[in-house]
Each structure stands twice: as structure tokens, then as C-alpha cells.
Image: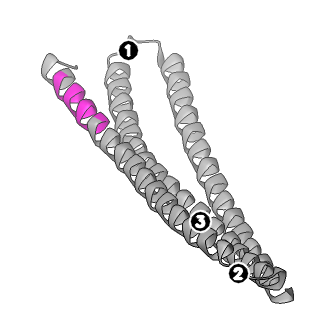
Amino acid sequence: MINVEQIAATNKANLDNLFGLSNKAFAGVEKMVELNLTANRAALAESAAHAKAVMAVKDAQELIALQTSFLQPLAEKSAAYSRHIYDIASSTSTDLTKGLEGKAAEGQQAVQAYIESALKNAPAGSEQAVAFFKQVVTASNTAVESVQKAVKQAADMAESHIQTATETAVKASKSVAKKR
């Protein structure tokens, strides 16, 4: 049977886990803020330098060359920025998922142990109901595992598509730059 000490220990563990997950989430937000500040600072400096260069242009040919040299690396920088955002989000999501899956597994084990304990004390003649209840719990656990696998597969597929799109964008920007 469950006692007050077990409930208190479980609540403490859940609270510790919540704070741990919150810290991971905030770390991800901090990385995003840092990335955005760095990217914005770089963009501002590049824009200022480009504006000064435009003001010093003497003819149309020089302006076209200047614009081309400014725009060509833009696609690569955008792709790199998007990739950094995805990496931060993916890493944070992975950390949170691992924490939640670990606690979910512990919770399932605790529920399973509680159910087993309760079913051992089931009244005589309830064997069929006990067997049915065990099947329901097993089916529920299997469904949870299937959903977790499907989510992981979807995340892996999304990562693959983002990687391919990033590579394609960079190749396209290089191809356009070479044609000019």
C-alpha cells in the first residue's frame, strides 16, 4: 500500500523534475536570445558598412557589383541562422523529451506496481476482470510507446528535410552568384 512518505517523496521528485525541465527550457530560450542578438548586431554592422559603400559608389557598374557582393552571402547567412535556430530548438526539445520520457517510464512502473499490488488483493472469482484489466494496462503502455516512436520518427524526418532544404538553398545561392 502507498503511504504518506511515498506520496511526499513522489511529489518532491516531481517538483525537482519540473524545476530541472524548466531550467532546460530557459537555457534554450537564453541560447535563442543570444543567437538573435548576435545576428542582429552583425546585420546592423553589415548594413552600416554597405550603406557607407553605396554612398561612395561612382557609377552604375560599381553599384551592381556592390549589390551582388552584398546579396550573395545573404542566402548562406539566412540558411545558417535558420539551422542554428533549428539546432537550438531540437536540442532543447530532445532534453525536455528525455526528461519527460524518463519520468513517464517511472510513472508507468509505479502505476504497474500499484495495480499489481491491488490485483493481488482482488476478491476470489474476479480473475477474468483482473486479466482484462492487465490487458488494458499492457495495451495502454504499448500505445504510449508507439506514439513516442512515431514522434521520434517525425522529428528525425523533419531534421532530414531541414538539412536538405538548407543545403539546397546554399547551393542555389552559390549558383546564382556564379552566374553574375
Q: CA gap, disc 3 to disc 2?
A: 13 Å
In percent of width and height, residue 88 lies at 48, 57
Task: Give me the disc on residue 69.
Answer: 2
Say which amino acid is labelled 3.
Answer: Ser
Furthest residue to the left? 5
The residue lying at 44 percent from left, 56 percent from top is: 37
Between 125 and 106, which is closer to the camera in this rendering? 106
Please, what secondary structure does the residue beneath circle 1 have?
loop
In the rendered view, does 151 fall on the left or right side of 10?
A: right
Which element type, helix, strand or loop, lies under badge 3? helix
Residue beneath disc 3: 47
For the residue marked with disc 1, what is the amino acid? Ala
Label annotation for residue 156: none
Q: Residue at x 51, y 61 (%)?
A: 39
Q: Eyeballing the image, is 16 above or below 131?
A: below
How busy is the neighbourhood of tag 2: few (under 14 within 10 Å), some, or many (20 plus)?
Answer: some
Q: Which residues are magenta?
A: 8-18
Q: Nearer the viewer, mark 3 or mark 1?
A: 3
Q: Say whether marks 3 and 1 touch (CB < 8 Å).
A: no
Q: Nearer the viewer, residue 26 or 111?
A: 26
Q: Nearer the viewer, residue 36 or 113?
A: 36
Residue at 40% x, 12% y: name it: 124
